[in-house]
Amino acid sequence: MVVSAPASAKLTPAQKLFTQKLLASSQVSSAVKLTLKKGGSVSSDVLFADLTGEGKADAVVTVDSGGAAGIVALYVFSAGTGKNLQVVYRNQRLYRAAARVNPGPALVYSLPQYKDGDELCCPSSYRETELKWSSRLKRFGVARRRTVTA
């Protein structure tokens, strides 16, 4: 039997900060909070880019289940024109997701699309969703969806 140190012992400063923010936020589901308390963690690869066009870097934060489900939630934190980081986007129903920032800038997340016979490691394709910030609506919206062959 392999016993590992508690996840909190290995967290980077960014992981610690965003774990605290997520656990304290009323916008985070109880399922995600439970995941963070029971072996999941904020992913170590927090992405930073000015996605909201306010001249400050926003943070793209993903939550890893700590198990086969991989990335199960995605959040964008922004300070807007102030100093307090707030959740400006959340998707809390993901499975084995991945996220990246494309030029523009735009946030893109992908989800595996499995067909009969696919192994967990190797889906047939991925469904990508590109999100862009609307300064008029003050929120992210879907700019494009596409399926990419693996």
Image (cartoon, rainbow, N blue to C red):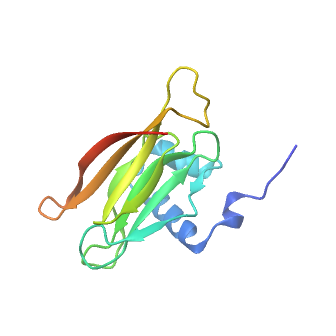
Where 93 falls versus 4 (above or below)? Answer: above
Residue 56 percent across, percent down from the top left? 32, 78
Q: Is residue 89 rendered to the left or right of residue 141?
A: right
In the figure, residue 68 lies in which quadrant? top right
Q: Is residue 116 rendered to the left or right of residue 148?
A: right
Residue 6 percent across, percent down from the top left? 73, 58
Where 104 falls versus 34 (above or below)? Answer: below
The reply to whether residue 27 is in sight is no
Where 116 falls versus 59 (above or below)? Answer: above
Residue 35 percent across, percent down from the top left? 57, 46
Residue 69 percent across, percent down from the top left? 57, 39
Where 129 falls versus 11 (above or below)? Answer: above
- Residue furthest to the left in view is 136
- Residue furthest to the front in view is 149
Residue at x 53% of width, y 62% of height: 19
Q: Nearer the viewer, residue 63 or 120?
A: 120
- Residue furthest to the right in view is 1
Residue at x 48% of width, y 50% of height: 98
The reply to whether residue 39 is in sight is yes
Residue at x 42% of width, y 70% of height: 48
Q: Is residue 78 rendered to the left or right of residue 7?
A: left
Query: On the rendered image, what quadrant is the N terminus found in?
Result: top right
Q: Nearer the viewer, residue 120 or 34?
A: 120
Q: Is residue 145 rendered to the left or right of residue 94?
A: left
Residue at x 53% of width, y 42% of height: 96
Q: How many marks?
A: 0
